[in-house]
Image (cartoon, rainbow, N blue to C red):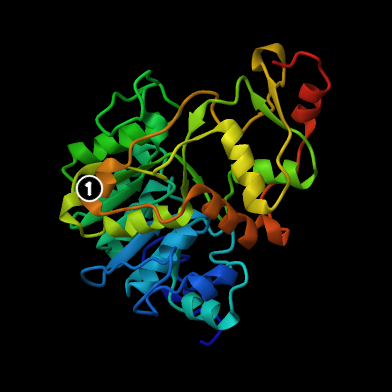
Amino acid sequence: MAGGVATVQHNLKMQPSVSLLPSSQSSFCGSKFTTSIQYKRKVCQPKGALNVTASSAKKILVMGGTRFIGIFLSRLLVEEGHQVTLFTRGKAPITQPLPGEADEAYNAFKSKILHLKGDRKDFDFVKTSLAAEGFDVVYDINGREAVEVEPILDALPNLEQYIYCSSAGVYLKSDLLPHCETDAVDPKSRHKGKLETEALLESKGVNYTSIRPVYIYGPLNYNPVEEWFFHRLKAGRPIPIPNSGLQVTQLGHVKDLATAFIKVLGNPKASKQVFNISGDRYVTFDGLARACAKAGGFPEPEIVHYNPKEFDFGKKKAFPFRDQHFFASVEKAKAELGVVPEYGLVEGLKDSYDLDFGRGTFRKAADFETDDIILGKSLVLS
């Protein structure tokens, strides 16, 4: 059905609405994608291209996949010749064109993506629908709790690999940095559900791989990471940064993360392993503000430092990063998987700006309420 949606109904008792729907997206296109990122279409590919080859075509289930990481990952999986099904609640569009993407490329991808509509917290439905389909590999992009993963494992006893998106936020705060995969973890972390999921996968004897990103950025980012800075730069406003601004952090581009997710597929070196994935350079908060300005072609930003303890922001979040040093080593991924980040920070921020914010698109509208509180007070660190 050209340009439309074909439906394949399962014969599942009490589940008449289960369907696999061809959906939408194509290979990474867009202004930069079509001109300087050609995925597996040229022998000699320029910087930023993803050139990975899976050993054989797999039937792959992606839990999530309609936002940010999942969008880029699903495109690469289809490019590699895999049959890809996205499991979502169907509340958001299953696919969307990338910035500047040609209709032909978008429609080509759209015809290959399948959709399984359901709620992953409906465990009976998950077991029944996944068992009926059978999948070789699961990419779990949006899993937060172990209890949400167990039904998937029960439904797929012959699963070849479970690839999980965890978080570097699981590490216990430490004076010794960068965080390494063997470092102590924090059972009280807000990401404790991801820790428990990793423990479940290990206890079940599943062939799993867990990826722990730090801060992720790039086009279509739904978290206010680079977007927070871009809003202030565009408005010509000072950038309020807590304390000294010398806190060191780390960002990784979403396309580099997508590459890493592909690199672990069917890779024996990734079996029952955890990998930190991010950029291979670190940056201070002040340095990040200046990098965002450079990426967007803005003047050198005015940075205002403040002491967060001297302000009451209520439930508002005044700054998008945790106010501490927070970065992780990616040496294991480099050595074991050959994963080398292709995007430098300014280059990656420029890619994000040019393909997203610079086109007038963003996820959250500008909100300067906490900025005004900070700038309106005299309690500013010199």
* Amino acid type shown at disc 1: Ala
Nearer to the camera, 186 or 288: 288
Residue located farthest toward the bottom when viewing the structure as drawn: 2
Q: Is residue 16 above or below residue 361?
A: below
Residue 271, percent from left and from top: 18, 49
Nearer to the camera, 90 or 302: 302
Residue located farthest toward the right when viewing the structure as drawn: 376
Question: Is 124 placed left or right of 252 in the picture?
Answer: left
Q: Which residue is mark 1?
A: 335
Q: Is residue 300 above or below residue 12?
A: above
Q: Is residue 327 above or below residue 67?
A: above
Nearer to the camera, 212 or 333: 333
Residue 117, percent from left and from top: 47, 61
The C terminus sits in image quarter = top right
Q: Which residue is located at x 24 percent, y 30 percent?
A: 182
Number of other residues with Cα within 10 Å of mark 1, as a class: few under 14, some 14 to 19, many 20 or more: few
Residue 143, percent from left and from top: 41, 44
The tally of labels here is 1
Q: Can residue 117 be seen by looking at this rendering?
A: no
Question: Is 25 placed left or right of 360 in the picture?
Answer: left
Residue 209, percent from left and from top: 26, 47
Nearer to the camera, 176 or 181: 176
Q: Which residue is located at x 34 percent, y 37 percent?
A: 146
- SS for callout 1: helix
Residue located farthest toward the front when viewing the structure as drawn: 300
Q: Can residue 318 be seen by looking at this rendering?
A: yes
Q: Is residue 167 above or below residue 346?
A: above
